Every structure is written in C-alpha cells, then in structure tokens.
Image: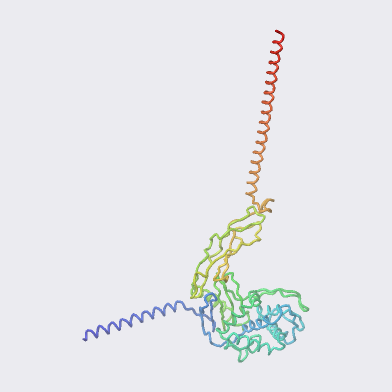
C-alpha cells in the first residue's frame, strides 16, 4: 500500500514539475514577444485583422494635448464648406504659436485653417474654426464632446479646442484609437493629415506661401495619416495610421516626447509586423502582364511586381476572399525607363482593395519612328518594309514574266501566221503549175 502511495505521490510531483516547466516556457515566449515603449499609454490596432496588437495603459487617462486638434478639425470638416472664408478675430490671432502667424482681420478659407490645425498644430487656426462654426467656442466644444460620446468614447472629455492643459480634460489610448479611426474615415481629414507641406493661398494680410513641418515617420516611404504631433515640447501625443505592404495599423501614443514617440512608432510597427500573419499573394519580380506604350520603338512591354504583396485576414476569414488584379496605366508614352512604374496590382480581400503593388517596366523603350504614332513598332515597321519590298519585287517579277510570256505568245502567233501564209503560197504556186500543164 505504501509503495502505491509513494508511486502516486511521485506521479503527482512529476505532473506539477511538467506543468511548471510549460508555464515557464509560455512566460518566456511571451517575454520574448513583448516590447517596452516609452509612451505612458499606447495602443496598436490592425485594421486588416480587426485585432488589437499591442496595448499599454489603454484605459488610463492622459491629457489629450495636440490630439484635441484632430477632433477640432474633424468637427469643422463635417460642418463647414472648405471654401468658406473666415475672418480671424483678435482673440484667435493672439493665440499665435506657429509659422503661419495669422493676423487680426485676415480672411482665410476653412480648408487652409484645417490644414494649419492638423499639419502645423496652429492654436490660432483651431480657435478661428471654433469661433466660426457654431457661433461660439463653447458650443463648438460641446459638439466635440457629443461627437466622441456618439462613438462610445466615455473616457474622453474636452475643455478647449487647442489641447492646452485644463483640469477635467482627458482621454485614453483606447478611446482615442476609436476617435482616430472615425476621423480618418473622413476624406478631408485623411488627405490633409497625410501632408507635411501645404501651400496657403494669398490673403488680405499675406502673400501665398508654402510651409513645411517635420513630424515623426514610420520609416521607409509609407505615408502617415493622422496627427503625428509637432516639435513643441508640450506636444506629447501622436495618433496615426501607418500602411506597410498592405498592413493597415492605427497607432496611438500618449505622454512622450517627439523623439520617444518616433522610437516607439518604429518599434511598434516592427512588432506588429512580427505578430500579424499575412499571406504572400504577389511575389517580387513576377511578370504580371503587358503594358501598351504609345509612340515607342516597341508597342508593348512586360510589367513585373516591384515587391512582395501580402494580404491579411481576420481570424474567421477565408483565403478564398483573397484575389488579385493587374491594372496597367493607359497613358504610358515613350521614352520609358526600365523600372518605371507602369501600373499596379490590386490585392483584394473580398471586394475591398487592401494593398497595391507597383508594377515596373521590364525594359527601356525609346521613341519610335513615325509609324509608332499609329501603333506600329520599329520592328513591325522593318518587317512591313521588307514584306513590301518582297511583295513589290514579286509583283514586278510577275509583270515582267507576264510581259515576256506575252511577247513569246505574240512571236509564236506570228510564226504560225507566217507558216500558214507560206503554205498557202506554195499551194497556190502548185495550182498555177498544174493549170499551165493543161
């Protein structure tokens, strides 16, 4: 009996040891996958899969700071005509704070004010929008709070339109993730927020001018949409959409310096790429069709994919939803350089285009001869010329041979007639001789 008890106890201890080892391994794997960021609050959401990839202090309240201006711009864009002219009040002009330097009584379009607010973080522009949308700044702030409540952001509240520190003004990474996605669904906000440069139209106080800002980037060539933040020390938040090879990420970073947000963004984008599984549906360098070339020495050339193309699916998604389609540009004119973008390959998940892979020219094409304006390549022109020469030569040979044959027939006819005449003369001469004999 005691032997059985000892055996049973040993088995129980062994089970605990094995279970403990498995927990240790799981924890170590999680530790390897987890990363640390400097931002106080952070969240990463993958639009393709509908999953939260990373979260830190997602429900902790932080001052919204400059992110307030995205909601200011959104409410204005939803309400105002972009061509509406707005006169800058003394109160708004006194806010200053950017290169734009709006002046009292200056007349500026709503679009330029939204650009100044989103791209350059202009307090004066944000205040001018608030004054001229619903009649008062307080009513505008009320509309901002109503907007975020309507999208179920219960841990967000605004007290002003610029993001200045104010008691009772707060948001969370989770709430602002929802705000960011809604804001970027607005075409005006999405297009403006992608820009780092904007040309402001001439006003009654300023000449036309182009201003640029330096914001955080995701690395590479992909554009960021949203509010990347400014270099101002008090601007400690960013909320952006980053697209890399078809993966659409929304990233919110709260309470960190610009350099810290830059480092965190790169780190989180890389982390998300390692955590979200994608399907490679387009292989780099694969020939995906031919493109027509106008006025070229060749009328069409091959086009190949510039990079790998991936599709990302939600957990319940089926690979059958993924498909591709190549679109060739219709205005490609010679000369064309090898590697020039001549089209793109759409990657679809369902009916939605989730990524576009550039298609590049397979070879260089110089300008063609005159027939190229009628869609005839240089090679085809040479072939046509040779064929024309051969055909002309053949026709000439036929004409010559027919003429020669005709002459030969004429000579034979004349010889036959001569023989007939000679025969008739001989017969006539024979009759005469016979008649003289009688």
User: Of 249 and 27, which appears nearest the observer?
Assistant: 249
Count of numbered circles on the image: 0
Q: How is the image coloured?
A: rainbow
Locate residue 361 relative to residue 431 in the image: left or right.
left
User: Of 430 and 185, which appears nearest the observer?
Assistant: 430
User: Above or below — where is 113 with respect to 382?
Assistant: below
Q: Residue at x 63, y 46 (%)?
A: 383
Find residue 139 and report its horizontal and vertical position in percent.
68, 89
Q: Residue at x 63, y 44 (%)?
A: 387
Find residue 373 and report its horizontal and vertical position in percent.
69, 54
Find residue 294 and report its horizontal and vertical position in percent.
66, 56
Instruction: Report which quarter residue 180 is drawn in.
Output: bottom right
> Which residue occupies the extreme top position in the image?
437
User: Of 143 and 210, which appears nearest the observer?
Assistant: 143
User: Above or below — where is 383 with respect to 365?
Assistant: above
Instruction: Report which quarter residue 333 is drawn in.
Output: bottom right
Q: Residue at x 70, y 80 (%)?
A: 113
> Which residue occupies the extreme right position in the image?
204
> Which residue occupies the extreme bottom position in the image?
167
Find residue 438 and report its horizontal and vertical position in percent.
71, 8
Q: Which image quarter holds the N terminus?
A: bottom left
């Amino acid at each position: 009996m005691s032997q059985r008890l000892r055996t049973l106890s040993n088995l129980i201890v062994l089970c605990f040891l094995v279970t403990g080892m498995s927990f240790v391994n799981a924890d170590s794997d999680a530790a390897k996958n987890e990363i640390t960021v400097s931002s106080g609050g952070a969240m990463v959401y993958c639009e393709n899969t509908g999953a939260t990839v990373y979260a830190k202090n997602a429900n902790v309240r932080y001052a919204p700071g400059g992110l307030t201006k995205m909601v200011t711009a959104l409410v204005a864009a939803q309400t105002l005509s972009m061509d509406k002219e707005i006169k800058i009040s003394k109160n708004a002009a006194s806010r200053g704070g950017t290169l734009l330097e709006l002046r009292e009584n200056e007349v500026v379009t709503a679009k330029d004010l939204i650009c100044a607010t989103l791209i350059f973080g202009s307090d004066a522009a944000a205040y001018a929008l608030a004054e001229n949308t619903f009649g008062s700044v307080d009513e505008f702030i009320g509309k901002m709070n109503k907007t975020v409540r309507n999208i179920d952001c219960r841990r967000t509240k605004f007290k002003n339109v610029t993001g200045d520190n104010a008691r009772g003004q707060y948001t969370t990474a989770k709430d602002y993730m929802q705000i960011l996605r809604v804001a970027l669904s607005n075409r005006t906000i999405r297009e403006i927020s992608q820009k780092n440069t904007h040309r402001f139209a001439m006003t009654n106080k300023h000449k036309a001018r182009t201003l640029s800002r330096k914001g955080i980037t995701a690395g590479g060539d992909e554009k960021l949409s949203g509010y990347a933040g400014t270099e101002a020390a008090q601007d400690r938040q960013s909320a952006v959409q980053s697209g890399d090879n078809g993966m659409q990420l929304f990233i919110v970073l709260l309470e960190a310096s610009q350099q810290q947000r830059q480092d965190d963004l790169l780190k989180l984008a890389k982390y998300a790429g390692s955590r979200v599984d994608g399907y490679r549906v387009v292989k780099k360098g694969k020939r995906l069709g031919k493109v027509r070339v106008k006025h070229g020495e060749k009328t069409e050339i091959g086009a190949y994919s510039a990079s790998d193309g991936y599709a990302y699916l939600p957990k319940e998604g089926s690979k059958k939803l993924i498909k591709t389609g190549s679109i060739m540009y219709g205005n490609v004119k010679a000369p064309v350089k090898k590697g020039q973008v001549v089209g793109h390959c759409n990657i679809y998940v369902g009916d939605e285009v989730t990524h576009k892979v550039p298609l590049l020219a397979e070879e260089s094409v110089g300008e063609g001869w005159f027939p190229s304006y009628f869609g005839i390549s240089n090679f085809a022109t040479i072939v046509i010329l040779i064929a024309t020469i051969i055909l002309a030569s053949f026709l000439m040979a036929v004409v010559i041979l027919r003429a020669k044959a005709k002459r030969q027939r004429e000579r034979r006819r004349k010889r036959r007639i001569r023989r007939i005449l000679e025969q008739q003369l001989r017969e006539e001469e024979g009759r005469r001789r016979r008649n003289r004999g009688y």
